[in-house]
Amino acid sequence: LADRFVEGECPLCGADGARGDQCDACSGLLNAIDLKNPRCKVAHSPREPLIIKTSKHLFFDLDKIQPGFEQWFETSSREGTWTPNSLAVTSAWLKKGLQPRCVTRDLKWGVPVPIEGFEDKVFYVWFDAPIGYISITACYTDEWRQWWHNPKNVELHQFIGKDNIPFHCIIFPASLIEADDNYTVLNHMSATEYLNYEGTKFSKSKGVGIFGNHCRETTIPADVWRYYLFSNRPEANDSNFAWDDLEAKSNSELLANLGNLYARVTKFVYAHFDRKVPEGSIDRFEDTDREFIDEVNTLIKEYIEDMEKAKLKDGLKTVMKISQAANGYLQRAKAWELIKSNKERCGVIMYLVLNFFRTLSALFEPFLPFTAQKANVILNLDSAPKIVETIEFVLAPGHPLNEPVLLIPKLDPKYLKELAARFSGNDGSSSSSSSAAPDDPHSPLDIRVGVIESVEAHAESDTLYLLKVNVGEATPKDVVAGLRAHYTKEELEGRSVALLCNLKEATIRGSVSQGMCLAAEDRKTKKVRLLTPPAAAPGTPIVTQGLKVVIPPAPLDLKLDFQKLTLKTVEEAGAIKPAFFHKKTKGSHAFQTPDGAFVTVDGVSAGSKVK
């Protein structure tokens, strides 16, 4: 039996429900035969007896290496940054005395043991899995030894949950040390405590809690999830996921502090300073400005110290302190009032804040990458800024800005209550992989933001291009597009598109096409224009407003499925938007990204067909 199929009472702490290899209650590593009152989790009857058989296995003699291992641990934990729980668990193991650890199993699934006489066995997963860090690096680059055989120049950071401390702090480093081949061994360990759900444990089997696939199905942007999880990261103690807390942290912290700051300033400059960075320079700063700069630079140093020590929760808190400092500065400087009485002074303040935004986006990018990307688009930056120790004044007066967009949407409390009910486990609905039943009004379209990386003319056609489109996956998608009569290669390269990704793969004029760039054809002029997604990272889903999604989406046949759908443009709030017309709802559902920003299309009229 696999370890996870055997459970019983822990011989160390007495907790029931310990697995055959580990007790979650006390973090003790076990052997299945050591459990008290063991039982099989998949047996037809809980009273069905377990049979113990003798089997020959390989053991890692940890007891023989303890003196050298203790010396390594003392040095690594002193010179590196280890969380208190990782220090406590490792020290407790050493105090008790390391014991031989079985590293093979009588299973069919797993990595076969390449030793004569053990061909019918596989490695125990927690002996083998950490070695995967090395092999994954070797799959990525032939130069993997520069990282894994270079301890003098490389520091190894690891991020785990506390239940995996013994495997990553003892067994894996001990394996590397005893291999005696100049391996890079653990320097810094960041082990978190547990994240609970509404005061209880997450449980997939009971439908309690929201998991990654569920998050993707909601309309809550990924960066809002990231913000909440980072701000609630259980670095010192167990923490709790709560829907009302998610609403408070997103609406009252992230939106109120960071989102509104960007919205007020960028819209203000866009309206009052001709969409450009106003006139300003360092020598025109006043005491209020310099005090703000000093405050921010001090906080940046604090932020860098937090991040270097892997105190990610504190690092994010410091980012929010920096953002709040800017809000306070604008109030003290009375920027909004000066536009009428002293526009020149107001311009200097805005010059300072816009350059500050460039620095700020680099600081919150590790936590909110999609939000940082949108912020950089507004500032019209050629490349993402790097983290620096002081504010840099790189944006010159006259630098053009792009139209402001919403960085952080407001979460709807009613919607969050619906999600809370769905994932409470009372009806088990959260165990489903789909957020919409087949008969519910839903969208059959899997559309994502894509960026065209390369364009080539099709050798066999005067109307077709061969595109490579980045949709955030390991490799770009090959797309055959009939756009040569409507766009030049230069117009397409680097352009964002709305790519239909669940269209069945087809071969067009000898070339494979893995998707379709959606465009609108004007019903009168027959002019074809590509849909324009809002600023978003490649792979960002484009959903249909008001409709649920089914994960995974069904593949669509071009003629039998897609061409039978009604996709047309509509005019809303002065903009032309593509929309899906659903037969059941008898209404139009505009395309938008999960943060509420709409897809648009220029150069065509309302009622144009989207294809």
Image: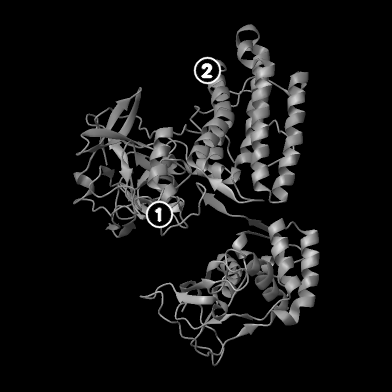
Residue farthest toward the bottom in the current orientation of the protein: 117
Amino acid at pointer 2: Ala
Q: Which mark is residue 548?
A: none
Q: Residue at x 41, y 38 (%)?
A: 417
Image vertical order of residue 181 relative to residue 152, above or below: below
Neighbor class of circle 1 (other Cα within 10 Å; few <14, some 14-19, many 20+) is: many
In this view, the residue in front, 327 or 6, is: 6
Q: Residue at x 59, y 48 (%)?
A: 239
Left or right: 147, with 592 as reference point: right
Q: Position of residue 516 (x, y in %)?
A: 32, 48
Q: Which mark is residue 271?
A: 2
Q: CA distance from mark 2 to mark 1?
A: 49 Å
Instruction: Find numbered disc 2 in the image and state the secondary structure of the residue it sits on.
Output: helix
Q: Which residue carries the number 1 mark?
A: 207
Instruction: Find numbered disc 1 in the image and state the secondary structure of the residue it sits on.
Output: loop
Q: Residue at x 64, y 51 (%)?
A: 237
In this view, the residue in front, 139 or 243, is: 243
Residue 385 appearing in the image: no
**In which quadrant will I find the C terminus?**
top left
Q: Position of residue 257 (x, y in %)?
A: 59, 29
Image vertical order of residue 186 relative to residue 481, above or below: below
Image vertical order of residue 24 relative to residue 42, above or below: above
Left or right: 416, with 350 as reference point: left
Image vertical order of residue 89 relative to residue 383, above or below: below
Q: Position of residue 51 (x, y in %)?
A: 46, 85
In this view, the residue in front, 139 or 259, is: 259
Quadrant of residue 373 within the rendered picture: top right
In this view, the residue in front, 327 or 358, is: 327
